[in-house]
């Protein structure tokens, strides 16, 4: 039965790699959609993997043609193509759940309907200084300004410390779709890995996470210093949140523990999660095997999700040199019960997740002693990758060729129509376009600035995608050459210049 099933995976990074390791032990065939040398493909011998982007319709359809079921190791996938192919191939978790969860604001709106406690949040509709200042008056400072989409590992977050920080915050996140979140003074950050099956929800123990610059640094499993009552509440909160979504598989749930022992959900991921890596060594069944079993309707005994012995997981980030992360791994070689996982991503980039180490011991005290030598080099890497307010890792030392084509749209909702055209440029013509949102209604000044400065950035052509009105191409054309609405309909070139 296991050998006859082909599981397709959107994405082949480190999560896909560890999922592949679990699949190999069960003789489950996995087919990866990602670039040729993706980490997950490096440990799989078969030649049936698909080369391409998990945001490209043709590539996703090609994967669907050869698989019995599709899952994802990352949320930022093309859910519209998944919706198209669901009659042909099973998709788990459901494309509806992935679509909601990949938009963090939509995720919060959805969870609020189920009574899940969260920090107060407000949507930005115009991304103006006046609007964010008004929200700041309501929520108070500091507050978190967050991108709704394409935000992870601190990317897309900005701490607005005071009213004076508002212009810089909006400038840093440009015209991405945004929302603001009330600042939470918490005692501890907790996480629970939840497994959703056809029969209900199961969960791994509650763990404690230490975040630095919005990137997970350490995970203590089980969490330290919480009462049985808090542990029970955390488990219930995580299970209730995941139960609000359709589909099967592993979900990662992060939450804040406040001083009064109440809990607020931070966010939820519809995939295997960094906070669950400890389970490979510390539990009878890892989160990766549990995900495969859940989506394939294989048995998952609750007892197999229990912790056998305390564990501490340390993330290894890229530092200032291409091999700086290896110093942490080399030091771990001398530590008893230290399991090293390097992701084979090649040369490191500053702040990039390059691997992790899990230390197990008879007691948490012993594990803390064993892990201590790893914290000094880890702290050095984290310190060099830190940015005081805007949590984007610094740019890598190399530079990509400057884009010669700019693609602009009035709203992020236009992106699903433009994806086929963007991928045509990238994969058929080898052109990596500059993509931005420049609304003629909400941000006319930025739209004019974008068009008037395009030539100085090396842009030779601007492709302006009009939605319901033609204001964007017409207004941008005043400053620069424009080709309009080439991705209308089924992606054919329509338009004028």
Image (cartoon, rainbow, N blue to C red):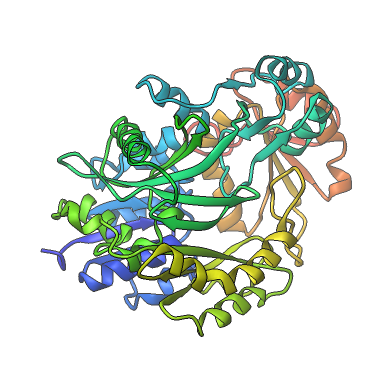
Q: Position of residue 22 (x, y in %)?
A: 29, 67
Residue 253 in view of the camera: yes
Along the viewing direction, whichever of 7 and 299 lies nearer the viewer = 299
Tell me the residue at 30%/34% (across/down): 236
Along the viewing direction, whichever of 26 and 316 lies nearer the viewer = 316
Q: Is residue 50 above or below residue 25?
A: above
**Rendered image quadrant of residue 240:** top left
Give the total number of marks visible in the rendering: 0
Q: Is residue 321 above or below residue 194?
A: below
Q: Judge left or right: residue 155 versus residue 171.
A: left
Q: Position of residue 443 (x, y in %)?
A: 75, 23
Tell me the residue at 81%/31% (across/down): 165
Residue 477 in view of the camera: no
Along the viewing direction, whichever of 494 and 263 lies nearer the viewer = 263
Q: Where is residue 478 in the image (x, y as percent from the top left)?
A: 84, 27
**Rendered image quadrant of residue 378:** bottom right
Q: In this view, does 297 lie above or below 144?
A: below
Q: In this view, does 114 lie above or below 402?
A: above
Tell me the residue at 81%/34% (across/down): 168
Q: Judge left or right: residue 370 versus residue 276.
A: right
Q: Where is residue 138 in the image (x, y as percent from the top left)?
A: 67, 14
Instruction: Name the image quarter holding the N terminus.
Output: bottom left
Along the viewing direction, whichever of 470 and 71 lies nearer the viewer = 71
Q: Which residue lies furthest to the bottom in this view?
A: 334
Tell me the residue at 64%/17% (across/down): 469
Q: Residue furthest left?
A: 1
Instruction: Name the image quarter holding the C terminus.
Output: top right
């Amino acid at each position: 039965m296991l050998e006859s099933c082909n599981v397709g995976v959107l994405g082949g990074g480190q999560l896909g790699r560890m999922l592949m390791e679990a699949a190999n032990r069960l003789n489950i065939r996995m087919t990866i959609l990602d670039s040729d040398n993706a980490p997950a493909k490096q440990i799989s011998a078969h030649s049936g993997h698909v080369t391409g982007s998990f945001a490209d319709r043709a590539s996703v359809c090609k994967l669907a043609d050869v698989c019995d079921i599709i899952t994802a190791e990352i949320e930022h996938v093309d859910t519209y193509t998944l919706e198209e192919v669901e009659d042909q191939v099973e998709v788990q978790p459901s494309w509806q759940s992935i679509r909601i969860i990949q938009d963090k604001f939509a995720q919060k709106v959805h969870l609020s309907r189920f009574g899940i406690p969260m920090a107060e949040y407000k949507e930005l509709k115009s991304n103006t200084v006046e609007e964010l200042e008004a929200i700041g008056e309501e929520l108070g400072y500091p507050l978190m300004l967050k991108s709704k989409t394409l935000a992870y590992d601190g990317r897309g977050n900005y701490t607005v410390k005071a009213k004076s920080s508002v212009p810089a915050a909006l400038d840093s996140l440009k015209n991405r779709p945004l929302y603001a979140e009330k600042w939470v003074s918490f005692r501890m950050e907790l996480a629970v890995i939840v497994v959703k099956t056809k029969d209900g929800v199961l969960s791994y123990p509650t763990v404690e996470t230490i975040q630095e610059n919005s990137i997970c640094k350490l995970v203590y499993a089980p969490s330290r210093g919480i009462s049985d009552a808090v542990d029970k509440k955390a488990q219930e909160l995580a299970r209730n949140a995941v139960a609000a979504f359709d589909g099967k598989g592993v979900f990662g749930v992060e939450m804040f523990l406040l001083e009064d022992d109440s809990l607020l959900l931070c966010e939820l991921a519809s995939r295997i999660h960094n906070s669950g890596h400890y389970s490979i060594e510390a539990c009878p069944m890892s989160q990766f095997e549990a995900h495969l079993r859940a989506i394939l309707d294989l048995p998952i005994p609750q007892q197999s999700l229990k912790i056998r012995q305390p564990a501490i997981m340390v993330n290894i980030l890229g530092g200032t040199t291409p091999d700086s992360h290896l110093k942490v791994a080399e030091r771990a070689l001398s530590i008893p019960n230290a399991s090293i996982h390097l992701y084979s991503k090649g040369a490191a980039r500053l702040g990039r997740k390059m691997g992790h180490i899990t230390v197990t011991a008879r007691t948490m005290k012993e594990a803390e002693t064993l892990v201590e030598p790893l914290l000094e080099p880890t702290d050095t890497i984290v310190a060099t990758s830190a940015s005081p307010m805007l949590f984007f890792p610094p740019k890598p030392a190399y530079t990509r060729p400057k884009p010669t084509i700019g693609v602009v749209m009035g709203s992020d909702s236009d992106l699903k129509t433009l994806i086929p055209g963007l991928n045509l440029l990238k994969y058929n013509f080898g052109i990596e376009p500059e993509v931005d949102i420049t609304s003629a209604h909400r941000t006319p000044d930025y739209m004019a600035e974008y068009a008037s400065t395009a030539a100085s950035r090396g842009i030779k052509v601007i492709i302006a995608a009009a939605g319901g009105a033609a204001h964007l191409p017409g207004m941008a054309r005043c400053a620069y050459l424009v080709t309009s609405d080439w991705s209308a309909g089924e992606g054919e070139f329509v338009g004028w210049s």
